[in-house]
Amino acid sequence: MQLYCHSLTQYRRLKTLEVKIGDLLLGNFHPIRIQTMTTTDTMDTLATVEQSIRCIEAGAELVRITAPSKKEAENLLNIRNELRRRGYTTPLVADIHFTPNAAEIAARIVEKVRVNPGNYIDKKKFEFIEYTDGQYNEEIDRIRERFTPLVKICKEYGTAMRIGTNHGSLSDRIMSRYGDTPMGMVESAMEFLRVARDENYHNIILSMKSSNPQVMVQAYRLLVRTMEDEFGVCYPLHLGVTEAGDGEDGRIKSAIGIGTLLEDGIGDTIRVSLTEDPEFEIPVCKDLVKRYDGHVTAEAPAIPPVDKVPYSPFEYRRRISKTVANIGDHHVPVVVADLMQAENVSRTDLQAVGYSYDAASDKWNISDAAADYLYTAKKLIDFDLPGTLRVICDHAVWLSTDRMCYLPLYQGREYLNAAERSSILNFISINAADDDLSDLLEAVRSDASAVLCCWSSHPQPMLSVRRLVIELMNKGIDCPVILAVESSDRTIDEQLIHFSTEAGSLLLDGMGDGVWLMNDPKKIVNDRVSGRTYLETKNNYQFINNTSFSILQATRTRISKTEYISCPSCGRTLFDLQETTARIRSVTHHLKGVKIAIMGCIVNGPGEMADADFGYVGSGPGKITLYKGKEVVKRGVDSAIAVQELINLLKESDAWIEPEPVVSEGRVSA
């Protein structure tokens, strides 16, 4: 199978064409550039300038500004001039939707324009249209006629361009022929790219954004392969997960999508789209990019190459594995809570991983995000556990325990030498970087109780573990695999990125029947130098457990909570997006599996919501439009009552359940 990167086992940046954006060089092995987008009204020159400066000083190397109409495009000149007057030369990018004339104005002013092929010329009315080949080619000719003037202006003025496809805003024409697919996203961009190439214009960057990291990753991979096949070269790639949301969820979803591609050397510039002030996106970008600064050294041991790729990297299909207890096959991936570093395990510790004990009734309450297994290393538990939770301990400890309550963990070849094993379930820690694992792999082939906990001591652990899973697939060894990822990073953001990239990358390719995250919970808080908050030991188990379930949720492999698709706000936004997102989250967070999109304006409306179940979209100052799927249900709802109207819509659609009462200090409150 033809791949989308140089190797599945060796990190190497993808060679792309060099693009010049003002004085900034991008692609062709230049450093991965960091960018963001302003959230101010573009007509408010001073506010946009001030926010741009905050972003630049935080580390943004490009700043994007929305230009939804001619007047905003024209005002980019005032913004650019004021920034230059203050000594800032960072390239500016005009964000264009629907309005070719605004793009043509902006291309004469700023260093780069972004156009969305889904709505730059085509319209989206969610109509299915059957085209003959002749009719379809006529539509391509129409695109050529409308798009060529912008290409010529960009070529004349030395302006760069991003052709930015969004999964949720594919045109009716593309949807009718290719469907709502990664290939449809690729073809949408390629149509515009072919026009530009015919004009001998190559100062182009491309993007394939989606709020679903699985779709996003597949689309970028397909784009790389398509460009290589058709042109023999690749244009630089701008990476991003659109509408990622806020807080930890937004960071995790972005890290999974962006990090998965960066691991394979794909990506020349990144933007993390958070529903927060844009300057807060920059530290997350920096944490992502720095993982690949000097990523490979000459001393790094080579990972053996892959002779046969037994899966398609362009579509999701979970690796076939057998069932061992509740792990593998059709079961959702399990979560292992690591309490190895706890001095003693108490009922309070279990509350942090989803189990709360009610002493009055002597019963356990189990949340949707409750860990499936508990690793205690050498410690035993002196209280009764909830019936759904099993304890893993070291094999030597297991030998002296009640075999029905505990399960053994073997360290690699310790499994081969064990005189006694569990008849139920045997966990085997396996280092993918070990030179020769053939005897161990053959031993577990016929063991119906074996579960491999795969990790790697190699400097490129994800590539190393992926190589091992591929070997299992090629050899027909179908033991379930738990992805064990350990982070020694100091900050929460760095650990989120580490866990999300290494576990998420494999889960997106169907590799993994569970996750086991580990860290070193140092009690370091409130670093005054960086202004960042570090981990606190008392909250660490909850942090690890929440992160595990959030990674599974973001990869769509296990749904345990409500999913929010929230745009990052910009100058088009018609309400306070951060405040509104928080309000909606506070009253709907208990609706497991429901996907709610919160969009600031019609540009990020029905199309950008992609596969959301319900949508809350700004349609005018103080006015909201509510969607069910892609269908408008209520228009012009006053924003003061719109959240309650969303709840009413959820109820009418049988998607609402009443939140469970909260028990606090012996009293029950709603």
Image (spheres, rainbow, N blue to C red):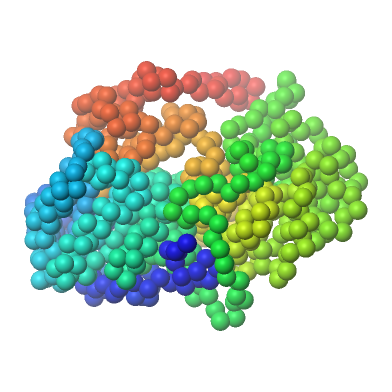
Residue lying farthest bottom? 298
Q: Is residue 167 left or right of residue 482?
A: left
Q: Residue drawn at (40%, 48%), measured in percent from left and top?
A: 215
How many marks on residues?
0
| Residue 363 in sight in this render | yes
Residue lying farthest top? 652
Q: Residue drawn at (25%, 69%), measured in percent from left and top?
A: 90
Where 590 falls versus 210 (above or below)? above
Q: Nearer the viewer, residue 72 or 330?
A: 330
x, y percent for residue 132: 19, 44
Q: Residue drawn at (10%, 71%), measured in percent from left and top?
A: 156
Where 130 falls versus 483 (above or below)? above
Q: Residue drawn at (67%, 50%), measured in percent from left and top?
A: 478
| Residue 492 in sight in this render | no
x, y percent for residue 351: 66, 36
x, y percent for residue 190: 25, 58
Q: Is residue 210 left or right of residue 433?
A: left
Q: Is residue 314 left or right of residue 235?
A: right
